[in-house]
Amino acid sequence: MSRRIVVAIDGPGGAGKSTVARGLAGRLGFLYIDTGAMYRAVALWARRQGIGWDNVQALEEMAKAADIALESNPPKVTLNGEDVTAAIREPEISQGASKVSAVGGVRRALVEKQREMARSFSVVMEGRDIGTVVFPGAEVKIFLDAEPDVRARRRVKELGEKTPPPPPEERVLAELEERDRRDRGRTESPLLQAPDAVYLDSSGLTVDQVEEAILRLIRERTSNGKELQR
Ligand code: DC
């Protein structure tokens, strides 16, 4: 039996983590886990219940109680049995997720769920703290980055395709930068490149080029690399 492998992809919003992680998981037959969607689901639940972003105790209870399920093909996120795939992508929930993710108790509850999800499967897991906190022993760690204006343009395109017309780029850039500052500046598991992570700037690369670069690394780093080749 081949051993379980963890591919950890961390980086700021809009760097291409989701697209690349989903693509890689599909190519490798691994489970794809979008941990940001879990923080978003907790933020959505809190917002609907009228819980303030500063009510850390209630937020921690919600993170523990939340029944979050992730499907990748097609992407679907359910919260307590309800399909919240679209609702968690609202701009207000993006900002809320960044706020609830600064709460230590919320992080501990979700990290536990993330480790449980990967207990029996090889996974490609993306987020902000996968290589540093969730799986510090991951076989492959990538820090995926891109220039801020490139990240903003990608987000504008994504949002415009989902719900036209596309939002103004300056607003998207400002929101991304605000979220980055919060994610990098918080005390609990800030967005940080693990010392043993490989830094990859996706600004001038296609999705396929990024996936190929990571696949090469996975093959180099894993003893059963041959089996991983398509
Ligand atoms: O990746 P995303 O934009 O969907 O993540 C939403 C928010 O959740 C983001 O502001 C940072 C936070 N997050 C986190 O703190 N740790 C993770 N592992 C994943 C996301």
Image (tube, rainbow, N blue to C red):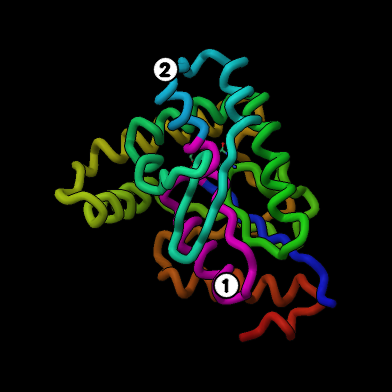
Q: Is residue 59 left or right of residue 170?
A: right
Which sits in the foreground, 103 or 57?
57
Q: Outermost residue toward the right?
A: 1
CA gap between label 2 and label 1 equals 44 Å
Q: Label 1, on which residue?
A: 213
- Give the x, y percent position of residue 49: 44, 21
Helix, strand or loop under label 2: loop
Q: Which residues are magenta?
A: 12-41
Mark nearer the N terminus (2 vs 1): 2
Residue 194 vertical position relative to residue 186 in the rendered view, above or below: below
Quadrant showing the N terminus? bottom right
Q: Which residue is painted at 41% across and 59% down in the image?
A: 203
Give the residue displayed 32% in from the left and 54% down from the top. Answer: 154
The main secondary structure of the magenta stretch is helix
Image quarter where the C terminus lies is: bottom right
Q: Residues within 10 Å of mark 2 (few under 14, many from 20)?
A: few
Frontmost of labels 2 and 1 is 2
Image spot of residue 204 (x, y percent): 40, 65
Foreground pick, 205 / 52: 52
Q: How many marks?
A: 2
User: Which residue type carries mark 2?
Assistant: Gly
Q: List the residue tagged with mark 2.
A: 50
Percent position (x, y) of residue 50?
42, 17
Judge from the rendering whether residue 45 lies leftward or rightward of residue 108; answer left or right. left
* Residue 138 is at least partly visible in this image: yes
Q: Residue shown at 47%/29% (left/top)?
A: 45
SS under mark 1? helix
- Whether ligand 1 has any atom under 8 Å from the Cβ at mark 1 is answered as no
Name the residue type under label 1: Ala
Would you say residue 29 sits in the magenta stretch?
Answer: yes
Q: Is residue 161 above or below residue 225?
A: above
